[in-house]
Image: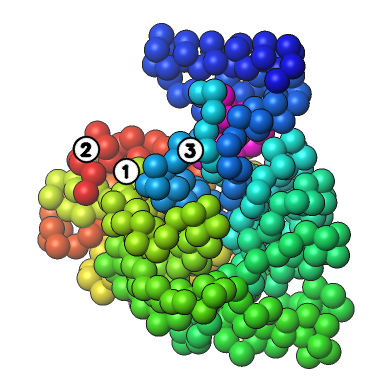
Amino acid sequence: MNIRTRAAVAAGRFVSWGLRNVAHRNASQLPGRVALSLDSQAIAGLSTKLIEGSIVVCGTNGKTTTNNVLAASVEATGKRVLCNRAGANMAAGVTAALLPGTTAHWAVLEADELSTVHILPQLKPTYLVLLNLFRDQLDRAGEIDHIQDVLVQALVSSPQTILIACGDDPLSMGVALRAQQSGVRVCTFGIGEDLHLPQDRVPEAKFCQVCGEELHYIYRSYAQLGKFACPHGDFARPELDFVATNVHTDRNGISFTVTVPTGTSYDLHANFGGIYMVYNLIAAYAAASFAGVNAATFQKTLDEYHPQNGRLQRFMVQSREVTLNLAKNPTGFNQNLSLLAADERSKHVFIAINDNFNDGKDISWIWDVDFERLAQAHCVNVYCSGLRAHDIQVRLKYAGIQAHVVSNVQEFMDGITSSALDQPAYVLTNYSALWPAKAELESMGEHI
């Protein structure tokens, strides 16, 4: 590190110490902002302390869980890992995650897709994991082709980075195709069988990334993910390097067999998730294996992993099982509704939608969510909350569901007190509503 970077790092560490030990506050972003304000190339300087390399995880849905499982599995091998576990995924959050210590074996970092163009040129990661691309916060991020352009630009700036991309997602493979043309190496993952699942009413993407012709699908797993091909032969799902088969999901979790590039197969299972989580865990396992994690260690990590960040986090409140999860765009919401449908018990549902800056001010996307699925999901009561509670209530009305508006999770839980305790509750929120809901549930009950 040069003198300027050393000064920036020292200042960032001092702010981090003050926040944690004096103010008793989160230090996931501000220390990074301070460091970058003093040296815009602080990430490059901090990257020199990584002994073996770095892995960046990005994609519309699933970044935080995938990143944290991956980091935990690498740590389980005895390696020191730097990680932004709280999900601070822009340049400041990445910088803050890199501040501690003088050396580390690996950095495993979640990155916002639009921030990769600022992070990759400096960090030069060993691997970039691209989970998926869906419409999300269009007023902030723009259309998906803009996000693709940014990701390609980021990869071209770091040509030694190996892209680990979802081969089932034509939008991710559009990025991979363009990156390959610039010399970037690509490894793919996906599901290698038809799961015969109901399809989303509004698919995210259905056109060839080369010629624009409508893609033909042999099968879809969800949204636009599946086995696809352009009828003109311009574009198709590649031969997958890491492929999942024997996929089974229910309310108790998921299990599948993953076959790796050598042809060897391993059985993996987790007590959380859904079809989308199968993709997340294949991606995490692929990256982990490249970092020296074997299948037994990865499985042990899954056995011991308990979500603590509001993503599929479970609580026991007033002797009732409550599941909290993030749902911030049509595809994410539809996958949450699939989880509810897989739980055959009668249940209560709380939906909170805000339109703060970090959520996106435009919430017209709620009309692309298949809320009609709730009508077949054995829901006893559905409640709405958040700044746009009445918008959700109207959308649910058109789905044939009568929903009640409440102020918060506490009022929701009070409203279902008289219901049978074997009826679980599901709390689904978009981003800015997640942390208040998590805090309320923690104050009322305990993690399970």
Give the label on residue 444, or none.
Answer: 2
Q: Secondary structure at mark 3?
A: strand
Q: Tell me if mark 1 has few (under 14), some (14-19) or many (20+) residues whose alpha carbon lies within 10 angstroms of its own.
A: many
Q: Amino acid at mark 3?
A: Val
Image quadrant where residue 382 sits? bottom left
Q: Secondary structure at mark 1?
A: helix
Q: Amino acid at mark 1?
A: Val
Q: Decide which of tag 1 and tag 2 comes sooner along the chain.
A: 1
| Residue drawn at (83%, 83%) of the image | 234
Cα separation, mark 3 vs mark 2, equals 33 Å
Q: Decide which of tag 3 and tag 1 comes sooner along the chain.
A: 3
State yes or no: discs 3 and 2 in contact (Cβ < 8 Å): no
Q: Amino acid at mark 2?
A: Met
Give the label on residue 81, or none.
Answer: 3
Q: Tell me if mark 2 has few (under 14), some (14-19) or many (20+) residues whose alpha carbon lies within 10 angstroms of its own.
A: some
The residue tagged 1 is 409
| Residue drawn at (62%, 17%) of the image | 9
Q: Which residues are magenta?
A: 86-99
Q: Of residues 305 and 252, which is closer to you in this image?
A: 305
- Look at discs 1 and 2 and give the one toward the viewer: 2
Cα separation, mark 1 vs mark 2, equals 10 Å
Relative height, residue 366 to residue 190 (above, below): above
Q: Of residues 314 and 169, which is closer to you in this image?
A: 169
Q: Decide which of tag 3 and tag 2 comes sooner along the chain.
A: 3
